[in-house]
Image: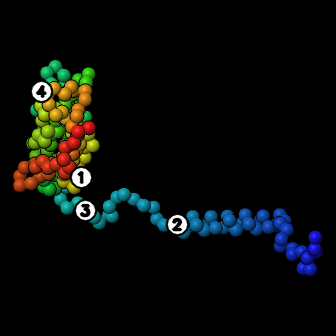
């Protein structure tokens, strides 16, 4: 092995003073970064921002205590899913509820209702039936987005198809147009 013509450099060997200097530098960087951090983020609106109207701040109608137009016999109606949004663009949110009878066996058909609360009214009321339970559909992938109600419906091609095994899957959308909810089908119904 050939010897180096350059003498060994003093800084190539670590000594305790090097570790102390490194620790001090790291502590300084950590302390300085905690002082220079940006302010904390908040989800609240700035102090000067006010809602457009008092009704815009109104909560959506609750499903509690509402009498749904579904016939369940001795069973009780159950709200399986719900979503909120201003469907008619009046500044007050509506509640869309997926409701079925509380059956202990099988998959009972769903109904979809729109609830609203008139200004000054004590209780919300059902103002529209988007899906009747007599149509024998089960609602999946349910949402309210951009003023429209969307859902995937599982159904039956004939009365002979057993309730356990829906054989049709359909994507639907309901939107408020000219004073009524209009149903459209973004995609064609297809078998499953």
Who is closer to the viewer here, 49 or 21?
Answer: 21
Q: Residues within 10 Å of mark 4 (few under 14, many from 20)?
A: few
Residue 131 percent coordinates (x, y): 14, 39
Q: Secondary structure at mark 1?
A: strand
Disc sitting over residue 50 in the figure: 3
Q: Nearer the viewer, residue 128 or 184?
A: 184
Residue that carries the numbered disc 1 in the rendered image: 145
Residue 74 sits above or below residue 84 on the image:
above
Point out the frontmost of discs 3 and 1.
1
Tell me where residue 164 sits by quadrant: top left
Pointers 4 and 1 in contact (CB under 8 A)?
no
Of mark 4 and mark 3, the one earlier in the sequence is 3
Q: CA distance from mark 1 to mark 2?
A: 37 Å
Residue at image position (21%, 27%) is: 163
The residue wearing badge 4 is 71
Mark before the other along the chain sequence, 3 or 2: 2
Q: Are marks 3 and 1 in contact (CB under 8 Å)?
A: no
Picture quadrant where residue 10 is located: bottom right
Residue appearing at x 19%, y 43% in the figure: 189
Q: Nearer the viewer, mark 2 or mark 4?
A: 4
Give the residue at the far bottom of this rendering. Answer: 5
Would you place residue 113 above or below residue 28 in this image? above
Circle 4: element type = loop
């Amino acid at each position: 092995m050939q010897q180096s013509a350059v003498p060994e450099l003093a800084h190539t060997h670590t000594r305790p003073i090097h570790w102390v200097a490194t620790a001090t530098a790291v502590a300084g960087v950590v302390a300085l970064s905690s002082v220079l951090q940006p302010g904390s983020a908040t989800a609240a609106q700035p102090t000067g921002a006010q809602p457009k109207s008092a009704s815009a701040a109104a909560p959506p109608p609750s499903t509690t205590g509402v009498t749904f137009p579904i016939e369940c016999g001795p069973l009780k109606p159950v709200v399986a899913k719900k979503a909120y949004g201003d469907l008619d663009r009046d500044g007050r949110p509506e509640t869309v509820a997926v409701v079925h009878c509380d059956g202990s066996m099988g998959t009972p058909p769903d109904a979809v209702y729109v609830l609203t609360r008139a200004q000054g009214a004590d209780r919300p009321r059902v103002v529209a039936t988007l899906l009747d339970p007599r149509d024998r559909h089960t609602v999946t992938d349910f949402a309210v987005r951009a003023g429209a109600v969307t859902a995937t419906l599982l159904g039956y091609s004939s009365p002979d198809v057993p309730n356990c095994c829906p054989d049709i899957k359909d994507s639907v959308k309901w939107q408020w147009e000219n004073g009524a909810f209009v149903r459209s089908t973004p995609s064609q119904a297809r078998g499953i």
